[in-house]
Amino acid sequence: MSAAAEHHPAYTGGRGDLLDVAEGIAADWAVLGVRGSFLARNLDTGEQLGFDIARPTPLASVVKVPLALVVLDRIATGALDPAHPVTVDPGTRSVGPTGLAAFRHPATVAVGDLLLMLSVSDNAAADALFGLVPVADVDARLRAWGCDGIRVRHRMNHLYECAAGAAGNDFSLALELALRDEHAGRHTIETLDPAHANAGSAAALVDLLQRVWRDEIAGPPATAELRRLMGLQVFTHRLAGELRADTLRWSGKTGTFLHLRHEVGVVEADSGDRVAMAALTRADRRAGLAADVDLAIGAAGREAFEALRA
C-alpha cells in the first residue's frame, strides 16, 4: 500500500457540520487521486474548516503573492519607484507560457506594471522583480512580519532549471519523476521538496490573506493595491469556478507546476461575508491538464463558502 493511501488527514473545524464539509472535500479529492491541504476561514467570524492545514507545500506561482506584497511595501515607503523602467530580454528572461515570459522581443516595463504578474502568472515579470528585491530580502521581510509559515528560497526560473537538471528537456519525464518521488517520499527535483522550495502551508497563506484584507501587514497603500491586483486574475477555473455571481467578487492567485495545482484567494459577497481560502494540491496522474481536479477545487471553494457564511 502506498504512503498516499495510508494517509489520514487531520481535520479542522470548530463545529460538527464544518468538520463534515472538510471531510467531504478530502474524500472527493481522494477519489480523483488528489492529495493536499485546504483551509477556508471567515475573516470576520474566525470560523474555519479544512484539513492538513499546517503541511508545508511547494508553492509554484502562489509565491508571487508574498513577492508582490514586499515589492508594494517598498513602493509605499519610497524605496522603489513604481515608474522605474525595467527591460526584459527574451535571451535572458525566465521560462513561462504567459506574459513577458512569452514575448519574443525585448520589452521595457515599469516596476508597477510588472506587478501584473499576478493577473496572468508571469514568471519573467516575477523574476524581474526578484532582480530588484532579491529572494533573501523577500524572505527576510516575511520573517520580520511574522509570516514564519511561508518561505521564499528561489526565483521562478529555478523551478524549470531543477526540472531540466533531472529530466533534460523532457517535461513528461519530469512529471513522471515528480509522481514517483511523491510516493517514495524523496525529491529528485529539488524545487518539489518543501525543505528547499518556495513553500508554505494553507494556514500560513490564509493568515497572510487575512492580514492583507484587514490591513494588518505592510501599509494600507500596499495591501489595497495587492487586493486590486489579485482581483484582476484572469484564471478563474479553480477556487472561483463555482463562485461566479454578480453578488460575489473573487481575488486570487493560482500556482501550477508539474503535478501541483494550487490557488489562494478571498471571496467577498455583497452581504458582507468574506472568506479566505487556500487549496494546495498534488495530483496523482501523468497529465498536464486535469479539468476534473480543477472542478473539484472549485466545488471545495463553493462548499466551504456556503458553510462559512454568517
Image (cartoon, rainbow, N blue to C red):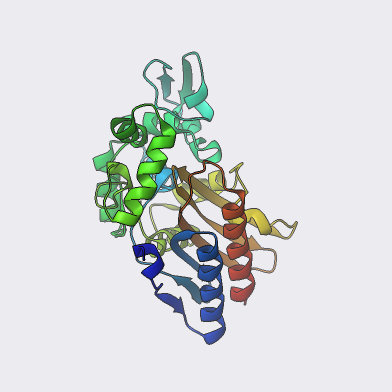
Residue 128 location in percent, x, y?
A: 38, 28
Tell which of 27 and 79 is nearer to you.
27
Residue 83 location in percent, x, y?
A: 46, 27
In the rendered image, the quadrant that contains the C terminus is: bottom right
Q: Which residue is drawn at 64% across and 68% down?
A: 272
Quadrant housing residue 157: top left
Tell which of 129 and 158 is nearer to you.
158
Q: Is residue 146 above or below residue 139?
A: below
Q: Residue at x 34, y 28 (%)?
A: 168
Q: Is residue 106 above or below residue 128?
A: above
Residue 136 location in percent, x, y?
A: 24, 41
Residue 275 location in percent, x, y?
A: 56, 66
Q: Residue at x 47, y 48 (%)?
A: 221
Tell which of 22 and 85 is nearer to you.
22
Q: Which residue is drawn at 73% across and 60% down?
A: 247
Q: In screen coordinates, is 297 left or right of 86?
A: right
Q: Name the residue furthest bottom.
A: 16
Residue 54 in sight? yes
Quadrant housing residue 267: bottom right
In the rendered image, the quadrant that contains the N terminus is: bottom left
Residue 76 in sight? no
Q: Is residue 298 above or below residue 136?
A: below
Quadrant housing residue 178: top left
